[in-house]
Image (tube, helix red, strand yellow):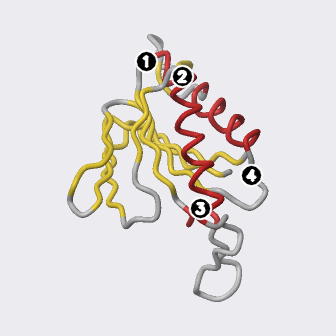
């Protein structure tokens, strides 16, 4: 799994002009799934996101995780994180898992984050989503597990 994690002051995702997920301060996590991902990959990524120290403490050092600051998590499926752009001008998505594999793993990722204590919102799988992000920082990290 691969994730693009952004620290946000707020974020939302809409489908057909209807908000389907929204958070206040926390993390917006774009998640891509590849062919070799499974339940253990989901657990590793959820643990990494939940414990990622990207929030500032009293000394303005990034020492706190999203749970430490009562932050929320918005999860957005993003198969394009596995785009291969090495050849030509048209991205290849051959490394992205098929929807029937990816969707349950992303759902499990959301459930695992919830089990860890996160308040989780999400987009809708296989739909055209509009994501509004208000970066806090900006802090944007790529995570591969």
At mark 4, the secondary structure is loop
| Real-space Cα separation, disc 4 to disc 3, in angstroms | 14 Å
State yes or no: discs 2 and 1 in contact (Cβ < 8 Å). yes
At mark 1, the secondary structure is helix
Sequence-first disc among 3 and 1: 1
Q: Residues within 10 Å of mark 1 (few under 14, many from 20)?
A: few
Q: Quadrant of residue 9?
A: top left
Single out the mark in the foreground, 4 or 3.
4
Sequence-first disc among 4 and 2: 4
At mark 2, the secondary structure is loop
Q: Which residue is mark 2?
A: 65
Q: Which residue is mark 3?
A: 81
Single out the mark in the foreground, 4 or 2.
4
Q: Nearer the viewer, residue 86 or 107?
A: 107
Q: Nearer the viewer, residue 86 or 66?
A: 66
Image disc number at residue 69: 1
Query: As displayed, is residue 82 above or below residue 113?
Result: below
Sequence-first disc among 4 and 1: 4
């Amino acid at each position: 799994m691969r994730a693009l994690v952004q620290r946000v002051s707020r974020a939302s995702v809409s489908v057909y002009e209807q908000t389907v997920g929204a958070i206040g301060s926390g993390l917006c996590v774009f998640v891509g799934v590849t062919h070799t991902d499974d339940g253990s990959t989901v657990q590793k990524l959820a643990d990494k996101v939940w414990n990622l120290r990207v929030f500032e403490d009293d000394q303005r050092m990034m020492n706190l995780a999203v749970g430490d600051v009562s932050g929320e998590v918005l999860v957005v499926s993003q198969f394009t994180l596995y785009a291969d752009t090495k050849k030509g001008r048209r991205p290849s998505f051959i490394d992205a898992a098929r929807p029937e594999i990816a969707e349950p793993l992303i759902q499990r990722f959301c459930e695992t984050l919830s089990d860890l204590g996160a308040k989780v919102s999400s987009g809708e799988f296989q739909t055209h989503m509009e994501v509004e992000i208000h970066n806090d920082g900006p802090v944007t990290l790529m995570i591969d597990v």
